[in-house]
Image (cartoon, rainbow, N blue to C red):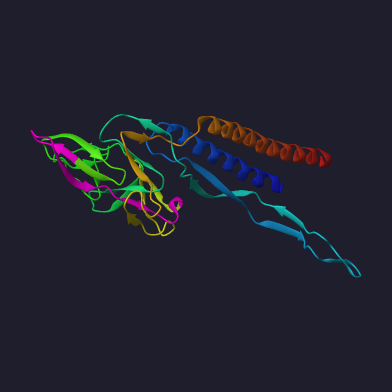
Amino acid sequence: MLRAFSTAATGMSAQQMIVDNIANNLANLNTVGYKRSQVDFQDLVYVELAAAGREVAAGLLAPSGLEIGCGVRPASTLKIFTQGEAENTERNLDIMIEGDGFLQVTLPSGETRYSRDGSLRLDANGRLVTSGGYLMNPTVTIPADWRSISIGLDGTVTVFAGADNTATNVGQITLARFANPSGLRSEGSNLLAETPASGPATIGTAGEEGLGTIRQGFLERSNVQMVKELVSLITAQRAYEINSRAIRAGDEMLTTANRLIS
């Protein structure tokens, strides 16, 4: 069997994975805080038919070898953490991180997760939670008689409450950052989990030590660029078609060889 069959098959599989990834990016075009991802590939092992530097004659060495590749394989998916577009919602509990950093979220199990989704809500106890109902970490509780809420650039939460509209500092939203944010594991629900590849979280105050600032009344939209994704989709589709043609060409070559024998 021609090696082209298996080699081209790996190419078709790779392009299919690219299309799957593009579909996920486009599906999350309007997801708050979503970061687009791309698939990275590596070439497979090579069959060395002749070594580079071999002696081809007395005192003469071959300047190059003869190697035939075996195709391609997926290596990783890489999240691109560029800043998404800011959308002015004019809602007191909507925040966005302008710059580096992640909000911290506490799961029911007590584990900590990280997110760029700043569409916050209040639960029945007046605590700040995500749109999925997960508690913010550290916990910030808003008094029941609140009239307005102010969130500063450094994450300080000030509540104006009561008949005299008294200002009270009720807590602060801190941010986390990672040495390698692309190493975080996606878990759905706009949540990311720490992994050995991401390194441990470094917690700090917004606007300090390289962390971004917090903007109240804004949401960070997805950083997916629709035109770029559509162009990549067309490219992947054409590459898939070309790889299928390589298989077809190999089949025609085998058919021709069979006719010579018969």
- Residue 23 at least partly seen: yes
Name, please, the residue furthest toward the bottom.
59
- In the visual, does 204 lie left or right of 230? left
Q: Point out residue 10 in the picture as x, y percentages from the top left corner.
A: 61, 45
Please tell me which residue is depicted at 80% across the width and 41% down the height of the picture: 257
Q: Based on the displayed image, in which of its 4 quarters is residue 57 positioned? A: bottom right
Q: Position of residue 72 (x, y in %)?
A: 62, 49
The residue stretch that appears in magenta: 159-182
x%, y% of residue 200? 37, 59
Return the residue nearer the eye: 10 or 62: 62
Determine if the magenta segment contains residue 25.
no
- Percent across and percent down for residue 105 are 28, 48
| Residue drawn at the location 69% of the way across and 35% of the way down | 245
Look at the image and tell me in which quarter the C terminus lies.
Answer: top right
- List the single residue furthest toward the right: 58
- Nearest to the observer: residue 40 or residue 254: 40
